Each structure stands twice: as structure tokens, then as C-alpha cells.
Image (tube, coloured by chain):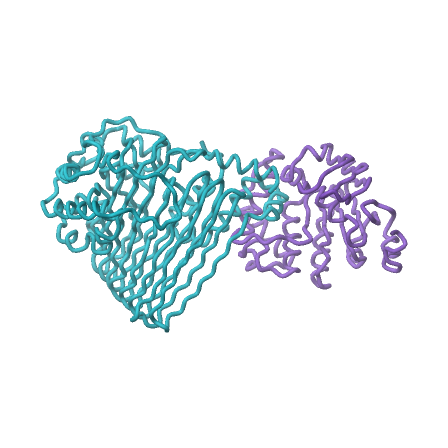
Chain colours: A cyan, B purple
Amino acid sequence: MNSETLNTLDTYSKNKYKYGFVTEIDDERPKKGLNEDTIKFISLKKNEPVWMLEWRLKAYSKWKKMKEPKWANLSFPEIDYQDIYYYSAPKGFEKKPKDLSEVDPKLIETYNKLGIPLEEQKVLAGVAVDVVFDSVSVATTYKGELEKLGIIFCSIGEAIQKHPDLIKKYLGSVIPPGDHSFSALNSAVFTDGSFVYIPVGVKCPMELSTYFRINAENTGQFERTLIIADKGSYVSYLEGCTAPKRDDNQLHAANVELIALEDAEIKYSTVQNWYPGDENGKGGIYNFVTKRGLCAGKNSKISWTQVETGSAITWKYPSCILKGDNSIGEFYSVAITNNFQQADTGTKMTHIGKNTKSKIISKGISLGNSQNTYRGEVSFLRKAEKARNYTQCDSLLVGNQCGAHTVPYIDSKNNTAVIEHEASTSKINEDQLYYCRQRGLSHEEAVSLIVNGFCKQVLQELPMEFAVEAQKLVSISLEGSVG
Amino acid sequence: MFLEIKDLSVKIENKKILNELNLNINKGEVHAIMGPNGSGKSTLANVLAGKEDYEIINGKINFKDNDLFDLNIEERAQEGMFLAFQYPVEIPGVNITPFLHSAINSKKKRMNEAEIDNLSFAKLLKSKASDLGISIDMLKRSVNTGFSGGEKKRYEILQMSILNPDLAILDETDSGLDIDALKIVTDGVNKLKTKDNSFLIITHYQKLLDYIQPDHVHIMVNGSIVKSGGSEIAAEIEKDGFQKFQ
């Protein structure tokens, strides 16, 4: 690698994180640490029914007996669960404000800065947004319009109050609290997140979106999202995330459950841009996320698309359980790691029903001193007649100090299964850079163009409103140009 | 002087490739360089374009009143230098439209000219493509990806005609082309030729020069130009080969 390339890489590694500001706002927190009192505090703050508190406490008692999963290709110091705040709410949110005039102007200002205006007239056309600040949902837009169609789009806290039957039936049905330590932890202390229910036969006419922001220091964020698409319905959902720059690591352990009934389709997209830490690997979010979708009914479909550019550590495997016959699971992923970021991400496709199909397209890009691992498991159970999987994992290395790893597991108990797996690892090619520059593009423009080209197959799966943003985000993760 | 190469010596990994090479090109001239394999022709093209693998041990190059060594690869391109590659590289996922659009605008920016908007660029690209017999379908594909040798070369000429360079260097553009493709490529060059731009055509064979009439022909052997003259030299090579110059 020649000197100019190294220089440019150097400017990448000074990558500026433009969402790193802190909002000075009074917040309300319980004592640090995790015990039954913390959970009771959260449950009380949320004014939850007794059954919910009991559910949480049961999860907590499971968590106490569990250890963190250690099989990932990640290294980080022991997480001290007693040194974390488990709840933080901007003051004045005991009751969710009815309209924006009741919201602290500083909060509105924060979201304006992040490019997420809360006033509906300014909101992205055709996108309904639920906004979660630390532990509480602060605003949900377009609610009225959606209600007319029978669509429920609200914070999970509100759903627990207003739709207890749906919550009791589905919460924890795809990710049981005892699945692993992070799901148990989330089940015990989850604070807010979004709830979506699409009634039978309804195609949701707009993108639903949740925007997560961690603001308070030493605070974990444990959001819980539950999406249910009833028979023959369709919904496309997008989540985005940012956090301020801080020297300490912050824990984020979310759980997302999707349920698609017969003939229903859920498209779930993530643009994850949590603070990744500085160029020496100090600070950043530990992102331990469990996302799982159940294709419960025949001909149902769940599609995950993720663009992962942030976080010091990403541990995340959005998965599909293909239970209904002819159901389809898809996973499209771009993961970019820079500096000292570590990502261990991939998917799990479990084929249970007949003629189930899954498709995995994973693009990993490693820069700086980062480590980027694709980990995937495709399994075919005994009754999964004529099931198919196609997997493609491509890794792109930029520089000499980073690593790319691919760990695919395939397990088939049915010999009619068809499995295709393709993988490639390449370095960014000096000849390509030379070619682009000879046409007059700068070195940075050329790298950005090549990387965007490498990711195109995945980026084009994003909802149109966000594809352009995601492309910019990919460029920003590579460049040092945005301050 | 438009392009002036003076006493240029260049090495790569301790091997001297160019040796005290001299060459002057004026505005509006077409020069051809012929030489056997390994004589340093492609090295000359890449040194002019600014590829960084080479060590310049001696000499100067002046291009449009700039010391060429003060400019990096993209600055040279923006100043109007274009290299049609011998082996154009594939760039998967990158479509020609945004690629060339960015390229032409980076040049406009350097020249302090107004940038071209999406619509005008799309029109320009379409009309130039149809001139060169390039289908709309081909414009939808990724740059050079999955192209045949001939398609790649035609693509190079398309890019050249869009960027409209002051100096176009064609590095063995004729290699791997059948007669039909060769004719399309050379027609493209001839159409582009004006009194304000210059061409440096590097070739192994005399065939190309049946279609493009050079004003000057140079024979290059062992990193130096050993003989210069008119198109009669090309005929001489065709008859006797390079042997007598080696």
C-alpha cells in the first residue's frame, strides 16, 4: 500500500462523529446497579400492572444464574452491571406529553440537530416516527392517521397499558427471557421501545420508524420492540440510533421480536450509528442486541436489512424462524468497522416448514485496527422439505491492520434441502483507485465510490427515503470530512 | 510547449525502465509511439498519468505550463490528461453514470466552470454512447464489469469523449480488438480530434495507424526514443520489425 493511501486512511481514522453532542437536561434516575428494587422502580415509573412486574422479576432471577455468551470474536473488559443506571428519563415525563408544547424545548432542539424534527408538518413525508430518548418514548408522529386503519403504533409502555392481551400473548414469544443473558437482562429492565400491530389485511401506507438516542451518562439503554403483522398485512419499519461522545463505554442491550402471521410481510431496516469510540478505541457503545423474527404463518416473509457503522462492539444476529410453510427469511447486512471497533454480526435462519426459503447477503468492510466477523447459522429441521438457502458473504479490507472473519455454520437434517454458499474476501484494489483518480476523482471520493459499490446490493434493499441517507453514512464512516 | 518531456529517467524496483527520454508534443498534434514489448511504452503512459509505483531519477515534464510532478493523479486528470488503459479494471457495483458525472464535475470545479446537472449529463452520456454504438443496456452495468475486451475499450473511448481531454494517451488501445471494434474506436478518436487537443498513441502494431493518421511516429527501444519521423517509419517497422533498432 503506497503512502498516499496510508495518508488517506489516516484521515479516515480521524473520522468525526457528528452526533456526539450532549443535551443538558435534567433527568431522573434510580440508584446505580441492578437488583429487585431497580426493577420495581422501573415498573412503578411506568405505572405497570402487576403481571408485568412479575414477568420482569422472573426474567431477573433467570439472569442472575446466567453468564454472558462468550463465543463471539470480541474482546472487552468485564461489564460491571452494578455500575450502570438502568433508567433515565428527562424530567417531566411521568406522563407522556400530549403534544409538543408540553415537551422541553431542549429535547425538540436535540432532535432537530439530529435531523429528526418532531413537528409533524416537518416530519419526513410518509414516515411515522416514534422517538425514544434514554428510557422513554418522547413522541410518536402520525398516530391519528394510522389509528384510522386500525394500526397500533405506540411505545411499548403505552401498549402494556392499553393492549395487555397482545402483549401477554406475544411478548417473549419469539425471544424467551431465558434465551441468553442479554435477553434475560433486557426482559428484566427494558424501559421503552416501539410496539406495532398491523391488523388483518392492512398494508401500512407509510414507513414506521423509531429513533433511539442515548443521552445520559453511565446509562444503559434496554429497549424492547414488538411488531405483529396479522394475516395478509404488510409493514416496513426502520430504526435509527445515535449517542453522545463519552469516554466510558455504555451498554445497549435491545430485544426486537417480529411476528408475521399467514401471508404477512415485515420489512425491518436498521441504520445503526451509535458512537463508535474515538480513534484510540476509547469510549463507544457496547451494542448487544437480540433480534428475532417468527414467520408463524404460511407464505409469510420477514426481511432484515441492517447498516451497521457505529458502536465500539456490535453483537447482533437478526434471525428468522421459518415455521410456516413457504415462508421466506431474508438478511441483508453492511457492517463497517473502523479504528478499534469490533463487530461480530450475522444471522440465523431456522427452516422448519416446507418449501421455506432464506437468503443472506452480508458485506463486511474493515478499516483501521478493527475486527469484523460474519457469523451465520443456517439449519434445516427434519420436516423442512425442499427448503433452500442462499448465502453470500463478502469482506473488503482497507489497510493492513484490520481483520475480516467469516464463520458460517450449516446444519441440515433433511436431505432435500438445497444450500448455496458463496464467500469472498478482497482488499481495496490499488488499480481501481488509480483508475478512478485518473478520471479526476479524489482518493477519498474513489474509496467511497468503491465501497458504496461493494455495498450496493444491500443498500438498495433499504426504503427509498433512507437509502440516500445510508449511502451518505457509509461515506462518512470512511471519510474524515464531516465535522 | 504543450507537453515537454526532458531527459526523463525512471526506475521501478531498481530496474531502470525509461532512460533519458525526450519528447515534445504541440497542441493539435497526433503522436504515435511504437516499440517492442518491454521497451517502456506503458511505463511512459503511467508516469505521465502519475501512477505512484515509479521512482523518477532524472528529468522534467512540463504540461500546459505546469511542472507535472507537482500534480497528483487526479489533478493531472482535471487539468485535461486522459489515459485510455490497456487493461481497464472492473469496479463492481459502481455505475458509469454517477462515476463519470463526478469525474466531469471535478474537472469543471478545477477549471472554475459551472457543474453539469444530472439531466444534462444523462443527455450528454446518451448521445455520446449512441455515437460509439454503445447500448443503453451497457450504460446500466457496473464500470467495466463483465465486459469483453472490445467493450472495455469502447467504454474507454466513451469516457474520453465525455471528458474531452487536452491530451489523450491511448495505451495499446488496439490490442485485443477485432477490425470492427478497432474501426469504432479509431473513428471515435478521429471525431474528437481538433486543433486544440493532442493525442499520444502507444501501439505495438502498425495496424492502428491505418485508421489514425499520426503527425509524428517515434520508435522506442530500451526506454529511449531512438528514431522519430513521419508515418513512413511505421511502414518501415511493418516491413522489417524493430530488430534493426535494438
Q: Quadrant of residue B166?
A: top right
At a point 14% along the width and 50% down the height, the residue shown is A163
At a point 32% along the width and 45% down the height, the residue shown is A288
At a point 71% along the width and 42% down the height, the residue shown is B47
Q: Residue furthest left?
A: A50
Residue A269 in sight in this render: yes
Residue A145 in sight in this render: no
Q: Quadrant of residue A469?
A: top left
Nearer to the camera, A420 or B212: A420
Q: Quadrant of residue B239?
A: bottom right
Q: Position of residue B19 (x, y in %)?
A: 81, 42
B197 w.r.t. B208: above or below: above
Q: Position of residue A13 (x, y in %)?
A: 49, 36
Q: Residue furthest right?
A: B244
Determine whether, in the image, residue B238 is placed left or right of residue A185.
Answer: right
Nearer to the camera, A390 or B31: A390
Task: Tell me the quadrant of the picture where the N terminus of chain A can be found.
Answer: top right
Task: Tell me the quadrant of the picture where the C terminus of chain A can be found.
Answer: top left
Q: Position of residue B220 (x, y in %)?
A: 82, 48
